[in-house]
Image (cartoon, rainbow, N blue to C red):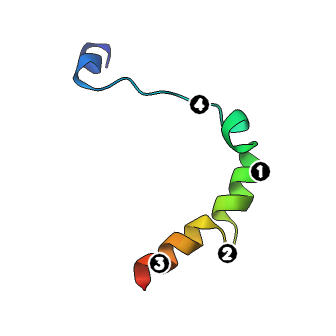
Amino acid sequence: MAEQKDRFPQTALFNVNDAFGGWPQVMKTHFASGGELDKLLAAGRG
């Protein structure tokens, strides 16, 4: 992979704890019933 790195832009990484408050918060906000994923999927159907 190292020989291919110049073909792609550098990506900024982040820490889930710092950016979103940890995995339990991510799961609650985005993947629980009625969460952000459900809202996106519903919008795509409508």
Asked if residue 13 is positioned above or below residue 35 in the image, the reply reads above
Q: Amino acid at mark 3?
A: Ala
CA gap between label 4 and label 2 equals 26 Å
**What residue is shown with label 1?**
24
Q: Earlier in the sequence, mark 1 or mark 4?
A: 4
Q: Of the residues under marks 1 and 3, which one precedes in the sequence?
A: 1
**Which image quarter holds the N terminus?**
top left
Residue kind at label 2, given as amino acid type: Gly
- For the residues labelled 3 and 4, the Cα–Cα distance comes to 28 Å
Q: If you read the primary sequence from the N terminus, does the residue marked by circle 4 or circle 2 appear first?
A: 4
Element carrying mark 2 = loop
Mark 4 packing: few (<14 Cα in 10 Å), some, or many (20+)? Answer: few
For disc 3, the marked residue is 43
**Could you tell me which quadrant the C terminus lies in?**
bottom left
Q: Give the quadrant of residue 20.
A: top right
Dot in front, 1 or 2: 2
Measure the C-alpha gap from mark 1 to mark 4: 17 Å
Residue tagged by mark 4?
14
Q: Nearer the viewer, mark 3 or mark 2?
A: 3
Front disc: 1 or 4: 4
Q: Position of residue 24 (x, y in %)?
A: 77, 50
Q: CA distance from mark 3 to mark 2?
A: 12 Å
Q: Amino acid at mark 4?
A: Phe
Q: Is residue 3 left or right of residue 45?
A: left
Q: Which mark is residue 34?
A: 2
